[in-house]
Structure formats: C-alpha cells, structure tokens
Amino acid sequence: MSSCRFPRLAEAFRSARRALCLTLAASLVAAAGAARAGGPLPWHEWLAAGRLGQDQVGAIVLPLDGGPPLFAHEAQRPLNPASTMKLLTTYAALSLLGPDYRWRTELRLRGPLQDGVLRGDLILRGGGDPKLVIEDLAELMAHMRAAGLQRIDGDLVIDDSIYGGDVTGAAFDGDPSQPYNVRPFGALMNFKSTKLVVRPNGRMAEVSFDPALDDIPVDNQIKLVGGPCRHGVANLMVRDGAQAGAPTVRVAGSYSRACGEQSMFAAVLDHRQFVHALFKAAWRAAGGQWQGRTRIERNVSQGAPWLVWESPRTLADVIYDINKFSNNVMARHVMLQLAAEAGMRPAVEADAARIVWAWLAAQRLRFDELVVDNGSGLSREERTSAEHLARVLRHAATGPYADLLRDSLPVVGVDGTMRKRLLGEPIVGRAWVKTGSLNNVRAIAGYVDAASGKRYALALIVNGPGAAESRPLQDSLLRWVYENG
C-alpha cells in the first residue's frame, strides 16, 4: 500500500497528519477485507436505518487464524459491554480455577449430638456455591439425617465470611424482586428466589411459594378482576414487607380470572431471612425438627467439619449456565471466587478485578481502557472495547478451553438468549453468541462459522438512546459475516 501524501504543513500539524495516515490505512485495510470477502458491507446504511451515530457503536470481526480484521468500526472505543463482560470473567475463571473446580459447603456442630438431638447450634459455612438449589439442599439434608441428626435444639448460624462487600444495597434498576438483581452471598441458596404461583379461587387469587418458605406469610393484595387475560403475572408487583416485626412477602396488582394459574420467579427477603425460610421448610420436609432462629456470625467455622457438601456441578457446568442464560449472581460469585481461592478473604470485587488484570497481563493482553466492576456486566461502570472482547475470544480459541467456552455460548436459532434469532436462515447453528442488554446498552460477542468454513470472533457494542433498536444491526452483521467471511 502506498504511503499517504500531503502538502507541506507547519510543524504543528505533523502529529495530526500521522494520525490521519493511520486512520486512512485502517479504513483501507477494513475495506480491502470486505472486498476480498466478496460482498460489500453497507455499514453506514445500517447505522442510518437504526438512527445510530458513528460514535455510539464499536464493532470488529477478527479471523481466528490471526489475519487482519474482516471489518472494524470504532473498535477501540471504550463502551459499556453489558453482559458480554461475562466472557472475560468466565474465560479467566476457566484458566485460573480449572473446569473441574467445585464449591464446598460445610456443616459444623456447636454442641453435642446425642440420640438424634443436636444440643446446640448448627453452623453452615458458605463456600460461595453459585447454584446451591433446593434439590441440592434436599440431598444435603438426607445426608444430615443419615448421619444421625433428627432435631436441632439451637440456632442455624451462617458463616458467610468467604465474601465481603454489601449484600443488602439498592437494586441495580430499583426492582429488588428481579432475580437478576440478587447480590452475592457466601451461603447463597436457590438464587434467593422462589416461584410465586398465582391461582384464581372464587373471589380471591391464592398465592403459594415453590420451593416452600417457612415462617413467611403472604400479604396478598391481589385484586381479582373479570375480562380477558392481558398481562397475567406481569401485572403484579412483589415487595418485601413486615407484620408484627416478622418478614412477609407482599403481592399486589390486578389479575384476571381468565388468566388461570400462572407463575413468576421473584427474589424475596434478605439473604438471612431467605436461608432461614428455605432451610426450615426443607428440613421439615426431610422429617427434621427445628424451632430456632437463624443468624449470621462470621469466622466461627473452626475445626474439622461434621459434613461437607460438594457441589455436583463443576465450574464448566456453572459457566454453561452463566453464558447461556446470562445469570448475573452466578457470574459475580465466579468472579469473587477468583479472589477467595487466591487467599483474599473476605473476597471483594476490587481484589477479583486485580486478579483478572494480572491474568490478562500474563497472557500479553493489555487493555488500558478496561474497567472491571463485578464481572457480570450488571454495571454502569464496566468498560471495554469491541476489539478487546474479540481478542479475548480469539485468545480463548487457541487454548485448552476453546470448546468449553464456545459451547457455553447461546447458539443462534437454537438455545439460550439467541434461540429466537435468525430463525430459518442458514446461519442457524453456525454461530455462538453472548448477548448483553442494559438500558441504553446492547451488545453481542462470540464466534461465527462462515459459509466458507472459516471461523471468526466478533464483537458489536452499542451505547446510546438507540441501543434498544439495534437488533437488526446485530443480525445484519452476523448474517453478513456468515455469508461473506
């Protein structure tokens, strides 16, 4: 390629000339790549159709063989990546913890166990398990019963000292009932969420919990109405409450009889209250007895544990859930676990971020614009560029966890958050794409197997008022890469 030529300019403009040369060269490389692909990319038309400004979008398409970009636009601009940040978190975790890593939850007895009765407290030391769900809890309690425990005369004491930070702060978007807003907790159970089942019965709508929660009455403020079913449970509001000093769950709103039985998942209570209610209901269902309280005491887990629950899920299993379904609290737990396993306890997000930075440096991936907050993308602070997201994906594709990471991503037209995208088109099943969504933010990042047989890493980030309408832009770029790559 010939060098850029300009008229003689004053010394003050020489640096601007060099910058312009570099910009023109990059544009020519991208254009040449598009031309070689055999089909023009109408990028500016796409942006205009979506009413998107040039500076609102960063995008890049990188061949995995290390060649020049097939396409790039503002690829180095720092932008909020939303949930595509989970790609960095999960890849770092695979590399630092290993795919076979498992979480441990420990139980200790503070008092003698005699004739099936624990005359003291049961200490539950949370190990940060991001997916200790009701089925696991039921199995753990079967082990407790098999080990001779029938009745607990003391309290349940939660040792959550593995993690630090605020577990009770305001919800990200002001709606604490949304499961995606649940904060990390060392003894997290069932995502601090339950399924609320609403069933019309005569003049009222009955509400029940699945799984069951003991000691938590429902403050049922649902107004049952006639007429067609328009919104169902989406019309209801769920909030924590209190009656006579005890926690309750308040459900309010209008619900049509024509909707029949419907359900919704909701995050309820604080972590201590939720563990108490879930543990007690599950222990009673297992045939156990307990009438005590639940409290949190940090760093009380001394000596050998009485029982250890090892998660049936490996880190690889957890990462599959995180990326396929964009689970925020699981991603945040994985991020914190990086610090916890490095001996930084209680683990906090700042320590975990430093570990990610150090790991990137060791991989010779220097990202000066990168801002890591909680690792899930549920943040207004996190920043990266499209180029650096794609470079992380390309780096992963050359390593031992290439298949694990790629297979954890939603498959276009098949599953996860991409199951309804580009249906009926040739690209279905040929692209693995993580999505990201916040108010004024949309993003995709992943891999595309082009019709030519060549594989590409791709990232597209949109920030700004038009982001919510950028899905056609995303689909157009994916389609173009498949057809022309």
Image: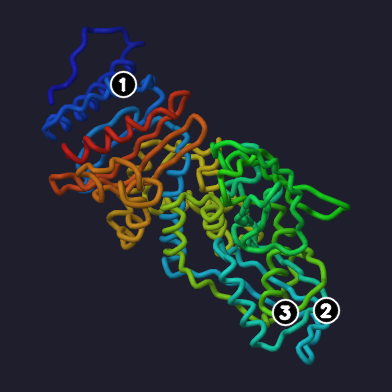
Quarter of the figure that contains the N terminus: top left
Q: Of the residues under marks 3 and 2, which one precedes in the sequence?
A: 2
Helix, strand or loop status at disc 3: loop
Q: Cβ–Cβ below 8 Å for labels 3 and 2? A: no
Label located before the other in sequence (1 or 2):
1
Horizontal side of 297 relative to 130 (left or right) equals right
Residue 19: numbered disc: 1
Can residue 217 be seen here?
Answer: yes
Amino acid on which disc 2 is placed? Asp
Question: Which element is circle 2 on?
Answer: loop
Q: Position of residue 48 (x, y in %)?
A: 32, 18
Residue 223 screen position, x and y as percent: 70, 40
Q: Which mark is residue 277?
A: none
Horizontal and vertical percent for residue 472?
33, 30
Asked whether 229 or 404 is in front, the reply is 229
396 to 8, vertically: above or below: below
Measuring 21% from the left and 27% from the top, which residue is drawn there?
A: 41
Say which quarter of the image contains residue 406. Answer: bottom left
* CB-based contact (under 8 Å), mark 1 and mark 3: no
Q: Give the structural element (helix, strand or loop) at label 1.
A: helix
Q: Is residue 183 visible?
A: no
Query: Is there a contact, CB below 8 Å, between mark 1 and mark 2?
Result: no
The residue under the point 57% across, 71% down is 136
In the drawing, what numbered circle is on residue 288?
3
- The residue at 68%/83% (across/down) is 306
* Residue reaching furthest to the bottom: 115
Color theme of the render:
rainbow
How far, Cα to Cα, is label 1 from label 2?
A: 74 Å
Q: CA distance from mark 3 to mark 2?
A: 11 Å
Q: Is residue 418 above or below residue 146?
A: above
Please rate how many residues cluster around mark 2, counting C-alpha atoms within 10 Å: few if below 14, some from 14 to 19, many from 20.
Answer: some
Q: Which residue is mark 2?
A: 153
